[in-house]
Amino acid sequence: MSELPQYQLPQFRRPVLLEQAMIHRSYVNENPRVRVHNERLEFLGDAILNFLCGEFLYQRYPDLAEGKLTPMRSSLVDEKQLAQFALALDLGSQLRLGRGAERDGGRENPNLLSCAFEALVGAYYLDCDDIDAVREYVTAFFESVVVEVAEPAPEINHKSRFQHWALTEHGENPKYVIVAATGPDHEKEFVAEVQVLGKTYGQGQGRSKQVAEKEAARDALEELGIYG
């Protein structure tokens, strides 16, 4: 993962909200005079991040279906990624932890860091009472990693790649042969082989002939060590 820029904390009109966002439950347990920890802010921030991340992806990728957008959103707001955002802000040094959490390395703990980032977002929303300001703030984080972390890689056309290899190496197009078809008509399973000049290079199976042929080409590329 590429290194994130060192972002700045947002400006708070009420610094007490930022302070609360950095208070872990373990600190409250050991300091009875402190009565509020960051879990409610974490809850709010989590909801805001999911909404704004979904909106960000919806607008950035207008042609992607829900099935593609959902895992992208998950990648951008999961514990690992939010912990990276927290590290970019050096939130670990600002956490108020109990002695046990401190001793156990809480300032580097991905769970505590991701929760702190969520709490920060929740606190910032309450402080400015302006979803547009929060949107602008978190979008910078999403933009910095979306291509590397969440954007789906282009699908490899295995048949085209293997055809290119066959033409380059042998001057011959590959030939696909269905060697087996099993099961009832509504649940048939096909097995295909891909051959060049009579030699079989790969085998694949699937619920259609097309899928079996693609799998055969993928298998051939793997056997040749040129897959991917």
Image (cartoon, rainbow, N blue to C red):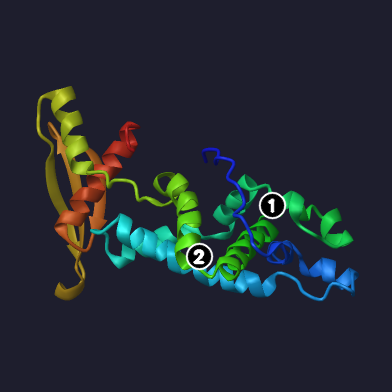
Q: Which mark is residue 91?
A: 1
Label 2: few (<14), some or many (≥20) within 10 Å? many
Taking the spot 20% from the left edge, 56% from the top edge, the residue there is 211
Numbered mark located on residue 53 in the image: none
Residue at (76%, 65%) from the top-left corner?
Answer: 23
The residue type indicated by label 2 comes to Leu
For the C terminus, which image quadrant? top left
Q: Secondary structure at mark 2?
A: helix
In the rendered structure, which amino acid carries the disc numbered 1?
Answer: Leu
Counting every numbered tag in the picture gives 2
Q: Position of residue 226 (x, y in %)?
A: 32, 32
Q: Are marks 2 and 1 in contact (CB under 8 Å)?
A: no
In the image, taking residue 98 as reference, residue 157 lies left or right, namely: left
Residue toward you, 7 or 12 = 12
The front one of 114 and 40 is 40
Image quarter of residue 166: top left
74 to 87, vertically: above or below: below
90 above or below 205? Answer: above
Q: CA distance from mark 2 to mark 1?
A: 17 Å
Residue at label 2?
Answer: 49
